Image: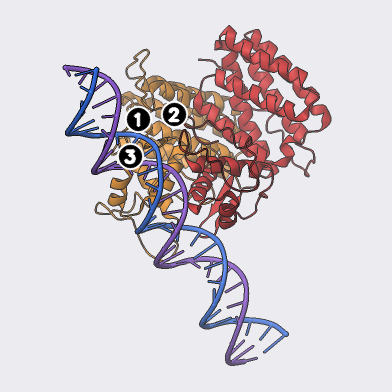
Chain colours: A orange, B red, C blue, D purple
Amino acid sequence: MVSPLWSADSEWNAIAVPAAELSSPVGLNRRPLYQDVAERLRQQIFARELEPGGWIDEMKLCADYGISRTPLREALKVLAVEGLVTMKARRGAYVSDVSRDDVAKVYRLLALLEADAAAQVAADATAEEIAQLKALHQKLEKQIRQREAFFATNEAFHMQLLAIARNRWREQIVADLRKVMKLNRHHSLFKKGRLVESLEEHRALMAAIEARDAKAASRLMHEHFANGLAAASWLRVKGESLGVLSRSPGKARSA
Amino acid sequence: MVSPLWSADSEWNAIAVPAAELSSPVGLNRRPLYQDVAERLRQQIFARELEPGGWIDEMKLCADYGISRTPLREALKVLAVEGLVTMKARRGAYVSDVSRDDVAKVYRLLALLEADAAAQVAADATAEEIAQLKALHQKLEKQIRQREAFFATNEAFHMQLLAIARNRWREQIVADLRKVMKLNRHHSLFKKGRLVESLEEHRALMAAIEARDAKAASRLMHEHFANGLAAASWLRVKGESLGVLSRSPGKARSA
DNA sequence: ATGCATAATTATGAATTCAAAACCCACCGG
DNA sequence: CCGGTGGGTTTTGAATTCATAATTATGCAT
């Protein structure tokens, strides 16, 4: 994400540029360049086109994007606060590297925050809101075969739940933490069976919410994350450091 | 704050400059200017020298600080991600302002996160770490008369607890949320009696931690925040229940 | 005088330029 | 043979310049 008010991510992924040059619909509606650049950088980082731990070559990226260093550097600073990038004084920016241990810690926070949100939704959401959520869940049920689509809808479900819980700081924090998770390849590499399991957990969660059972919703969400983490532990290496650069967290916004 | 690795806040508040010009010890050790600028901006915002909701005049600040717009604008973008500042496209930066409702929501998150940290500390911290924490608590006991010092030590205690709980994302998030709280003047304006109450709660929390009672530690921290919020409700706007916090699902899990 | 169109001013967004630190590598001395 | 030293290159950090959108002010017509 970027920031609450001026968020409105969108459209980078949608635009298909040859290999360089940022969209310049010219004139109208334009939003600051550094936001587009930040979004594009995120995409490249998640896609591993910029390798974790690797140095980020400003000049090269400027050439690739066809822009000057100013907006690029602004974007890098934004990503640094988000934790996707690490700044080293006088030696530039590096793609953050997230250790396995970090993944566990982030899962813990996600569980905490999302479980709380689930409880709040079960307790306070309107019937309409719950219906919207259910619609997303049902979409998920149908996409069990398509990995990519499943992941996307899964995230949409979680973010929608957060949105309904109405706490923009929590929303922001969770969004940031989820971005950090995407840095770690192991995260999305669950084994085959995990998708089915995950779906079952969603089903149970959805039921608890519909039943207005806040406590159960919270517990089920906690379990959902606990299971996710367990599944992500594809290969349990003990001490493993691997974290060349690891580092920071996210923020919050305001009105 | 800014970012974990290259954090090292410090020293702005300490430097007493006439009215302009940033420190330039020249040459050695320097860290990027925008970080100093970001820190100074935070100070000015917290001190209400820049009023909440107000427009931030880049030119004027550049003149005040004796720098160019580039590092100032970089700093503003950092603060925007942190939530202290809001960017409006093509019309500059504004100091964020935090509604009373926002305060309640942030308290809720702080309660969740810090309660979890407290539980983890009770369960896993070493004797030495707990001793350090206790030292801070005892310092707090002695400072009950000095408001300013009390606030400072109070924050130090909370942050130390977080540090011991060893989850840098949580640390970062809490630090950011606490910064947002500082935007709202009502936060620190508790009434006289609150300090004593707060101290008592700390005492109970400390006891639970020493007793290695994770569940109690979590519960006490939740209550600590619930009470803090209640006290911060200097002026109870109409119906508003704000019982939001009281019924949060008290998670206390450990591993 | 009031309201709208248009010109002048101001501030933002981005590119470019400039200064200085870090890096690289060859060379030199032990 | 190795480590340190010096110069040249690269890259970062920050100031400055340039272009354009937004705001304010001005003038004209009704």
Q: Amino acid at mark 2?
A: Arg
Instruction: Name which residue type carries label 3.
Output: Ile
Subunit bearing disc 3: A
Which numbered disc flags the more N-terminal residue, 3 or 2?
Answer: 3
Judge the density around disc 2: few (<14), some (14-19), many (≥20) Cα neighbours within 10 Å: many
Pinpoint residue D24: horizontal percent, then vertical percent: 62, 71
User: Of the residues shown, which amino acid type is indicated by label 1?
Assistant: Ser
Secondary structure beneath dot 1 equals helix
Q: Quadrant of residue B222?
A: top right
Q: Chain of mark 2?
A: A
Per the image, the residue denoted by label 1 is A188
Classify B157 as above or below B184: above
**Quadrant location of residue A169?**
top right
Spatial separation of the CA atoms under disc 3 and disc 2 = 16 Å
Residue that label 2 marks: A247
- The answer to whether marks 1 and 2 mark residues whose Cβ atoms lie closer than 8 Å is no
Q: Residue A6 in the image: state x and y as whole percent.
A: 51, 51
B130 vs A153: above or below: above
Report x, y in % for residue B162. Answer: 58, 22
The reply to whether label 1 and label 2 mark residues of one chain is: yes
Disc nearest the viewer among 3 and 2: 3
